Image (cartoon, rainbow, N blue to C red):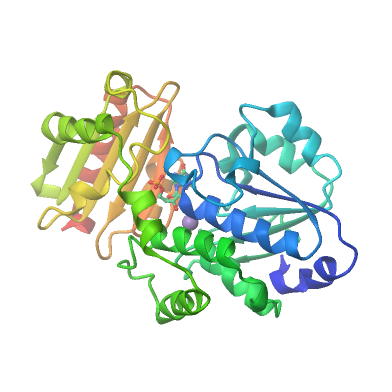
Amino acid sequence: MRPILEIKPLLENAPGKITITMHQKPDADAMGASLALYHYLLQKGHTVQVISPTNFPDFLKWMPGCDRVINFEADQAFALEALKDTRILFCLDFNTFRRTHQLAPHLEQLNCVKALIDHHQEPDPAFDYGISNTAAAATAQLIYEFIVAMGDSALINGDIARCIYAGTMTDTGSFRFASTSAAVHRMVADLMDRGLEHEPIHHSIYDNYLENRFRFIGYVLQNRFEVFYDYNTAMIAIPHKDIKRFDLKTGDTEGLVNYPLAIQGIRLAALIIGWENDVKLSFRSKGDFDVNRFARRYFQGGGHKNAAGGHSQDSLADTVERFKQAIRENKDLLK
Ligand code: 5GP
Ligand code: MN
């Protein structure tokens, strides 16, 4: 993989068709980074299309340009048509094509220049250009740095600033995680100097619940919450019937995994959800316990040291049993 900046000649000369894609069920960072890059490349004169492998949460529907994002799951033919004569494919906020779900085989077989901009560990070797910086707080931060390194900071307009801020704000837990470097604060200061208003972004993402989501949180904290003090671990395991009962939508379980982590002494938090076809696991940790390794080893997943996820094809009950076995095996590391 050549350094991302070496792609510069391809972006400066001859405008062409560019596609941007991200991981399935995109979060604010995946969408924010993709749309920031979208608004930038449009200004560079390219024809740009953003494709999401799936739908995205309603609380991101304020993001400028999100109404032009193709949902591959809902509109396959349209997405494949858009991919057809793409000259450059940008892959944002994921490390392996697998994370784009059903879109993966279509991306893999594309015969075009492929570029990666991401902050997860162990990227696929399939990219021509890219940056995989696990020290970055968010992919949105990497987009900001890319635009600046391209010599185009004058093109960072209000739309780009809001998208970058949203992605960075969410991936840093509102600027609290260890990844929140001085460079992140300098970037935010620069965005504010350019006129960014940050408060409405916090409101649209964090103060935008429907009543059912609140009642759902109350219900699961009461009924689906378990603490394993011997292992400094707390878990929320949610059967599919709860998802149906509270009529939850994409994104409604976002942030739930942080509740168990807020308990005194807890070092590992797990959120295990029985979705329609598989079981999804989310892990968070405080301190040294490496959930990226944990998710890779036990649940076909990955992520970062303190935030990772995985999947299981077993039933929810069997997955929970496997999780309990896994924390027993990690007792020493969880002390
Ligand atoms: P979340 O728990 O919010 O879904 O994900 C936390 C972090 O782990 C994110 O950086 C996400 O990209 C990563 N992650 C979540 N699920 C998976 C997975 O199944 N595989 C891999 N490789 N990473 C995941
Ligand atoms: Mn991210």
User: Percent position (x, y) of residue 261?
Assistant: 20, 52
Residue at (15, 36) in percent of width and height: 221
Q: Which of 285 and 196 lies nearest the eye of the viewer?
A: 196
Residue at (58, 35) in percent of width and height: 101
Q: Quadrant of the C terminus?
A: bottom left
**Is residue 189 at least partly visible in the picture?**
yes
73 on left or right of 173: right
Place residue 85 in its image quadrant.
Answer: top right
Residue at (11, 58) in percent of width and height: 265
User: Percent position (x, y) of residue 256?
Assistant: 27, 43
Place residue 280 in its image quadrant.
Answer: top left
* For residue 126, above or below residue 144: above
Counting every numbered tag in the picture gives: 0
Q: Quadrant of the N terminus?
A: bottom right
Q: Which of 288 and 88 lies nearest the eye of the viewer?
A: 88
Residue at (38, 41) in percent of width and height: 298
Q: Which of 293 and 132 lies nearest the eye of the viewer?
A: 132
User: Percent position (x, y) of residue 308?
Assistant: 39, 50
Q: Which of 99 and 333 lies nearest the eye of the viewer?
A: 99
102 on left or right of 83: left
* For residue 271, above or below residue 267: above
316 on left or right of 155: left
53 on left or right of 335: right
User: Percent position (x, y) of residue 259?
Assistant: 20, 47
